[in-house]
Image (cartoon, rainbow, N blue to C red):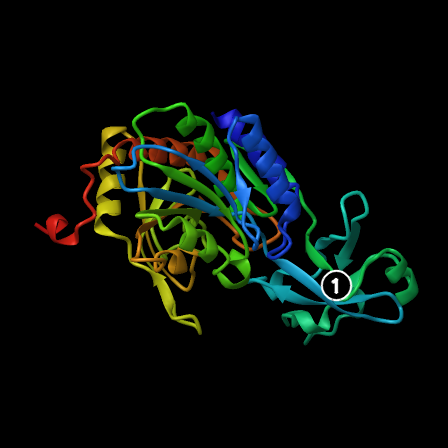
Amino acid sequence: MKDRLRETLSALMMIPGLSGHEDRIRRHIRARLEDLGIASRSDRLGNLIATLEGDRAAPSVMLFAHMDQLGFVVRKIETDGLLRVERLGGVPERALPSQAVLLCVAEGRDLTGVIANKSHHATTPEEKYRVVPYAELYIDTGLSSAEAVAAADVAVGTPAVYLPRVLALADDRVAGTSVDNRAGCAVLLELAGRLKEQEGLPTVHLVFTVQEEFNLRGALPAAQVLQPDIAIQLDLVLAADTPDMRGRSDVKLGGGPAISLYSFHGRGTLNGVIPHPAMVRLFEETARAESLPLQRSVHMGALTDLSYVQLAGEGAASIDLGFPIRSSHSSLEVCDLKDLEGLARLIAAAVKRIDPNFSLDRDELSG
């Protein structure tokens, strides 16, 4: 499974898919589902939905991961051909100078560029330790006029992403662009193949969602249509095993998948997820039964689209599941394939336990 996950993840990471511009990555995922003999459909926002029909007496499950990535949108083209951009999503300004980017014009006609960094030999002592605001930065594509840029079909509104890259690191670790959340999509595709061959499961809706990095709400149309009893979201969990992160949690890269027991975003978006107790019990008991490691995360300052999916219809019994990641939202994020494999095994085993007797009644659960 690990080799299959590596191949799938690497392929997904090389396909650009800025929030609101997920068409290429959606088509690729749809083709992979077709190869597995699984039909899928898209809604108007671009969510990709594949339903594996199961026991209708059991609670239905929406298992989902967002396929979009963060990046930039061209907002101004200077007369000399340099490009000014707006950030889309939580792009860290301090990590932008000297980054390579891809202007997504069309397949086969994309344009590479670099976010310029002022020449070191001309940098003043005061500038050496200053984080340059993104509005002051510009992208250099090599084109030397606004007319040349227009001829390349780059215009105001053109999406851009970090230049797609995949780097194989030691010990089954992978670095590259959009590990968040192409790793979640890779696990979801792995699960598609595994769950398709099993009998006695609940109905499972596999959903590859859009616009998570933009406003977290792109998954809502899918959730409103599917009305799942259970919602399980796959995304990153911050690893805290490096010097700059120690003290935040005990989550470590290579330590296995993780469940989130609490997430909240207190800066402007008053939302988060406190998981349903039935979901916590399900994954803890499954991990013990399968002898799988399971890390626990409590995090302030981050959200997933589950924050809104959980509120669809009468409400869904929800939980965030994740894989540890280092250097989130940078151009080279890092994950461990063993964590992805463990996550796939955990979910596959847990879904088997959701039968007609699986209770979501909070009073029953509290004894």
| Residue 344 located left or right of residue 78 | left
SS assignment at label 1: loop
Whole-percent x and y of residue 229? 30, 48
In the picture, residue 135 is in which quadrant?
Answer: bottom right
Is residue 4 left or right of 199 when viewed as pictured?
A: right
Q: Report the number of numbered marks.
A: 1
Any part of residue 335 in sight: yes
Residue 284: give x, y in percent of width and height. Answer: 24, 40
Q: Who is closer to the viewer here, 342 or 148?
A: 148
Occupied quadrant, residue 157:
bottom right
Q: Residue furthest bottom?
A: 126
Q: Is residue 75 above or below residue 287?
A: below
- The residue tagged 1 is 117
Query: Residue 170: x percent and y percent?
Result: 54, 33
Judge whether residue 10 can be spotted in this image: no
At x 31%, y 53%, the residue is 316
- Quarter of the figure with residue 356: top left
152 and 100: which is toward the camera: 152
Please give the name of the residue rendered at 62% of the width and 50% of the height, measured from the top-left corner: 22
Quick one: which residue is furthest to the left in this view?
Answer: 367
Instruction: Please name the residue shown 45% across and 57% down the image.
Output: 220
Direction from residue 238 to residue 39 in the image, left or right:
right
Could you say where residue 66 lies in the image, as x and y percent from the top left?
50, 49
Q: Nearer the viewer, residue 2 or 225?
A: 225
| Amino acid type, label 1 | Asn
When the figure is inspected, residue 243 is found, relative to residue 294, above or below; the finding is: below
Is disc 1 surrounded by few (<14), some (14 to 19) or many (20+) residues within 10 Å? some
